[in-house]
Amino acid sequence: MGKKFALAGMVLALAAVMAGCTEFNQDITPESKGIWNQYIVYPLSWLIIKAARFLGGSYGLSIILITIIIRLAILPLNITQLKSAKAMQALQPEIKKLQEKYASKDAVTRQKLQQEMMKLYQEYHINPAAGCLPILIQMPILIGFYHAINRTPAIRESSFLWFDLGSADYVLAVIAGITTFLQQKVMMSGGDYDANPQMKMQMNMMLWFMPIMIIVIGVGLPSALPLYWIVGNIFMIVQSYFIKSPAASMPVQNAKARGTKK
């Protein structure tokens, strides 16, 4: 729980810092200066506008299309994340044994436990940090969307369905929170956490913490961002459905098979 909540806190802090940076009140143009403007904000603004023209002038559909393209681009990372999460679930009994073996709280024993767990991850070819990379990669994109929407008059003044893309919408923020809950629920399905009650408690807390955080943040942001989250969550739910545990747990099964042959 500590690492995941620390990551969530870091993401929020990064969002708070970057959301107010670099000429936020000035419209984005090809002449806008700075790395952030030239390589993140303006390209996203340009993509949204070009895609909207292709889709009959709908900026809402444009954001949906670009969200799907971004998700497809980082799909290999998300697949690695999902497989790593499933493998970690399958490895919980082995982790539990190590925790019981090195149950002492002194510094030397805790260090030994960490070393043995790292050996376990290496043996089974599992990267515990695999889940962080997709989140970190998406953060500049998400904040770039925030700037592109607010700094492009054609986008911030347009509407889609019942909401204005440049204004906050409570209903959309709640839907974003619900889809976040469902996405996490699907990713957790099939996991055996009974062998590690602490892990089970952490996962259950994250199951509720993340959707609530998304809702709280979403009600104060332009509705285009909750739209981005909703489409991304639906994409992840479909992805998780097709990438289920047999393939995801293969690293652990292969490692166990190798251990049996020794």
Image (cartoon, rainbow, N blue to C red):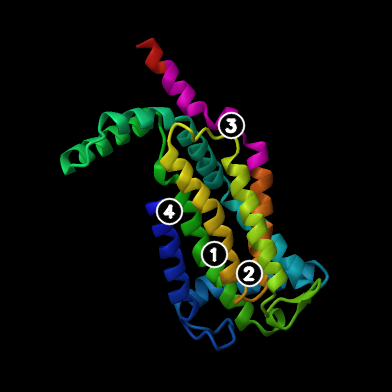
Question: Separation of disc 4 and disc 2 at Cα?
Answer: 22 Å
Q: Residue 73 or 128: which is nearer the viewer?
A: 128
Whether 167 is drawn above or below 52: the answer is below
* Magenta span of residues: 240-257
Which comes sooner in the sequence, label 1 or label 3?
Answer: 1
Q: Which residue is mark 4?
A: 4
The residue shown at (65%, 50%) is 182
- Percent coordinates x, y for residue 183 in the rendering: 63, 50
Which comes sooner in the sequence, label 3 or label 2?
Answer: 2
Instruction: Determine whether the residue tagged by mark 1 lies in a helix, strand or loop.
Output: helix
Q: How many marks?
A: 4
Q: Amino acid at mark 4?
A: Lys
Question: Separation of disc 4 and disc 3 at Cα?
Answer: 22 Å
Label 4: how many Cα within 10 Å (few below 14, some 14–19, many 20+): some
Quadrant for residue 151, please give it.
bottom right
Res 239 label: none
State the quadrant of the C terminus: top left
Which label sits in the foreground, 4 or 3?
A: 4
Q: Is residue 242 magenta?
A: yes
Q: Which residue is mark 2?
A: 225
Whether 156 is drawn above or below 102: the answer is below
The residue shown at (71%, 60%) is 65
Instruction: Determine whether the residue tagged by mark 4 lies in a helix, strand or loop.
Output: helix
Res 245 label: 3
The residue shown at (43%, 20%) is 256
Taking the image as shown, residue 64 lies to the left or right of residue 258, namely right
Which comes sooner in the sequence, label 4 or label 1?
Answer: 4
Q: Which residue is mark 1?
A: 213
Q: Amino acid at mark 1?
A: Met
Question: Separation of disc 1 and disc 3 at Cα?
Answer: 28 Å
